[in-house]
Amino acid sequence: MIAGDALPTLEAPRVRLRALTDRDIDALFAIFSDEVMMRFWSTLPMKERAEAERYLASIRSGFADQTLFQWGVERRDDGEVLGTCTLFNFHRASRRAELGYCLRSPWWGKGYMGEALAALIDYAFGTLRLRRLEADVDPGNAASLRILERMGFTREGLLRERWDIGGQIGDTVFLGLLDREWRGGQA
């Protein structure tokens, strides 16, 4: 799906999506150990930097076998990695994938993720020629639901007791966006 040995860089007004490198391990640890952000995630927060090292290795492995494309969301003015955006769970015959994203909690509400998602959705429907994107969101994550709905995603159902995260059972809201529904850049 993506030729070459690295993810392409995707530009947005204030952020860029770029391949993650070894120099981003501390940023990955900061993102995935952020307990406020991770309360809406499907795993427990990281406790040790070594977990971020293993996570980066899994990101690289996913790219190598073309099953997961995960970008760092970097602020353009200072190069700080604020979060990640991911395409995964590809079903090539149906031209669909799942969209995932996260942003460290200090950067919530500033419009960074809206810009990043618009660039990624453009890429998914344009360059990758996907027909459908899907997202899975914790029902308590009102901000995430709002941003996806602003992007044109439609709520398609509630999946009850979908996740068990450290003994906490949680539901998920399932959303979908079709290529023909995407109007691009309305973040």
Image: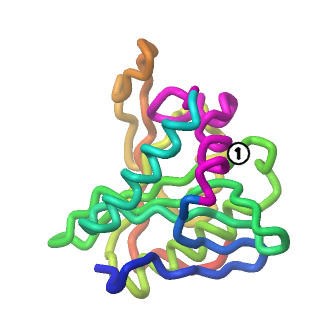
Of 44 and 132, the residue lying toward us: 44
**Residue 185 quadrant:** bottom right
Label 1 Cα crowd, 10 Å radius (few <14 / some 14-19 / many 20+):
many
Q: Is residue 26 magenta?
A: yes
Q: Is residue 133 left or right of residue 30?
A: left
Point out residue 53 in the picture as x, y percentages from the top left corner.
Answer: 49, 46
The region drawn magenta spans: 23-47
Point out residue 66 in the picture as x, y percentages from the top left corner.
Answer: 27, 68
Q: Is residue 152 magenta?
A: no
When the figure is inspected, residue 180 is found, relative to residue 82, above or below; the finding is below
When the figure is inspected, residue 167 is found, relative to residue 37, above or below; the finding is above
The N terminus sits in image quarter: bottom left
The residue located at (37%, 79%) in the rendering is 5
Point out residue 168 in the picture as x, y percentages from the top left corner.
Answer: 45, 15
The residue located at (46%, 62%) in the rendering is 70
**Residue 105 quadrant:** top right
